[in-house]
Amino acid sequence: MADVTREQLYAYLDDALDDAEAARIEKLIRGSAAVRTRLSKVREERDRGEHSLGAVWRRERLSCPAREQLSGYLHEVLDSSLHAYITFHLQTVGCPSCQANLDDLKEKQAESTAQTRRRRRYFEQSARLLNDARK
């Protein structure tokens, strides 16, 4: 049980660990009833409610931009100050929630671009076939 601290469990619950450390703690949780019990106690502490300003700020993700703002960031249509803040939030703070949101938006944009190309190709082929049929 000494392999994982209370603070590490809090960080684990907040998705604030790097991938290697999160994987290590997940392995400990799966393999040890004592660690699972400790994690359960940490969750209970959190559910009882830590009401400090910092805890509320982290829990409610008050500094995170909205998904629409992340979309604007991705399309580079934001004013420079908001763009700079989101860059700071993603790169310096390293918010895993916002990074996942941005990755999802990028994936949806790539899918949309592929669908648009496919539709354009179908339209062009259909138009060519119609023109050939008229001749």
Image: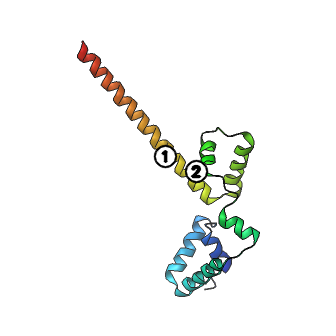
Residue 81 image position (x, y, % from top left): 75, 43
**Secondary structure state at the residue bearing disc 1:** helix
The residue at the point 58 percent across, 81 percent down is 39
Which quadrant would residue 43 be assigned to in this image?
bottom right
Outermost residue, bottom side = 34
Quarter occupied by the C terminus:
top left
- Asked whether, in this view, residue 53 is left or right of residue 8, the answer is right
| Residue picked out by circle 1 | 108
Q: What amino acid type is highlighted by mark number 1?
A: Lys
Q: In front here: 63 or 22?
A: 63
- In the picture, the disc for residue 102 is 2
Q: Position of residue 75 (x, y in %)?
A: 60, 39
Above/below status of 112 relative to 36: above
* Image-based side of 50 in relation to 116, left or right: right
Of callouts 1 and 2, the N-terminal one:
2
Circle 2 crowding by C-alpha within 10 Å: few under 14, some 14–19, many from 20: some
Quarter of the image with the N terminus in it: bottom right
